[in-house]
Image (cartoon, rainbow, N blue to C red):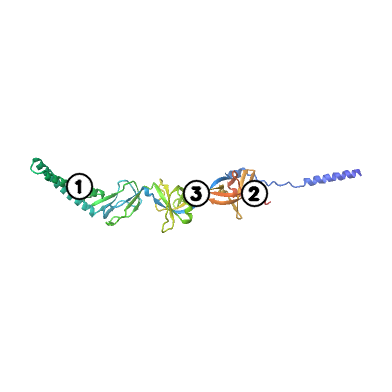
Amino acid sequence: MKNIIIFSLLSVFTLAACSHKEQPPVENTKTILSDTMMSMIRIDSVRTCNIDDEVSLNGQVSFNENNVVKIFPRSSGQITESRVSLGDKVSKGQVLATIKSADIAGNYSDLSSANADLAIAKRQMDNAESLYKSGISSEREYTEAKQNYEKALAAKNKVSSTLSINGGTKSSANGQYQLTSPIDGYVVEKKVAAGGYIRPDMGDYLFTISDLKTIWIYANVYEADIPRIKQGYSVKVTTLAYPDKVFSGKIDNVSEVLDAQSKALRARISLDNSEMLLKPDMFAKVMVSNEEGAHALCIPTNALISQDGKSYVVIYNSREDVKVAEVTIVKTVGDRTYIDAGLTAGQHVITQNQLLIFNQLISSDTK
């Protein structure tokens, strides 16, 4: 009987040992990032940021009206020569056009008459002075001759001043005068051609010269966006000609009156154009940024993963500790996304190749 009990116990232990030895090992589903994967990812931190708001506006490049000169004709006449074209670079004093004017010719005729009258008055005064000193004529006669000379001199100076104002020179006695550039710059507007006439009642300018080293962008601000646009806000400007180049500046003026045609305010942005890339009348896209004063957690936009209408990120604590977290988005502005749930400040998220890790973590959780 004793032997039977011992055998039974041995059988139980043997069966238990065999049962334990045949149990399969438990799989380890923990995700560990390999050295190769670590070299493929990028990591960024979760921060508390001011909430930025961006408004997209349509704009147009214009020359800086504070650094521009509009050149008007000085007298009516016919344009005999136009020496520059639109876009040409000009130097200070360079001749832009030559104009033949009847007014200038008349001024020179008046100048000849004035010079003749002045010469006669001068001889009469000298004679009167000589006779007065000799006691032959009275002081009154000498005084009258002197006054006549002064009148003739004033008349001559008046004609000379008129010619000087109208651009007359010694070489323009035939009635021609020249328009010259008062500054170094570029011809940004031209409204004349050789053979054209300038009427006496024409009050328009003929050329516009600008140095183009700084330019203005005029952006249209429609009523819905007016509260979000203020002087001093930062802007980023892009153009069709240079889609990959961003020009940064600030709004330096916002008009107070809506344009009657477009029903929009005009915001003016001054930009440096030392590289001469921006040309007047180019179309531009203006992104206006401002701070609303509120704060929220922010992450790089490229850290987000969208699936089934939800947004996720991959949180990185260490190469042996990565996990998926669902986040609630407040808004996305450019390369920055604001969230109000799912993360805490100071955590780290993967911003490159995170989708590979996300898929691996999701597939591990579903096993």
> Could you tell me residue 58's position as x and y percent?
45, 54
Residue 290: assigned label:
3
Query: Could you give the CA–CA distance between mark 2 and mark 3, rounded to whole angstroms?
Result: 38 Å
Looking at the image, tell me whether mark 2 or mark 3 is earlier in sequence order.
3
Judge whether residue 270 can be spotted in this image. yes
Q: Is residue 301 visible?
A: no
Residue that label 1 marks: 154
Question: Is disc 3 placed on a helix, strand or loop?
Answer: strand
Q: Quadrant of the N terminus?
A: top right
* Residue at image coords 81%, 46%: 16
Instruction: Left or right? Give the position of 222 relative to 123.
Output: right
The location of residue 349, given as percent across then percent down, is 59, 46
Say which amino acid is labelled 3.
Answer: Asn
**Amino acid type for the residue under numbered disc 2:** Leu
Question: Which residue position is annotated with label 2?
Answer: 361
Out of 243 and 127, give the one closest to the viewer. Answer: 127
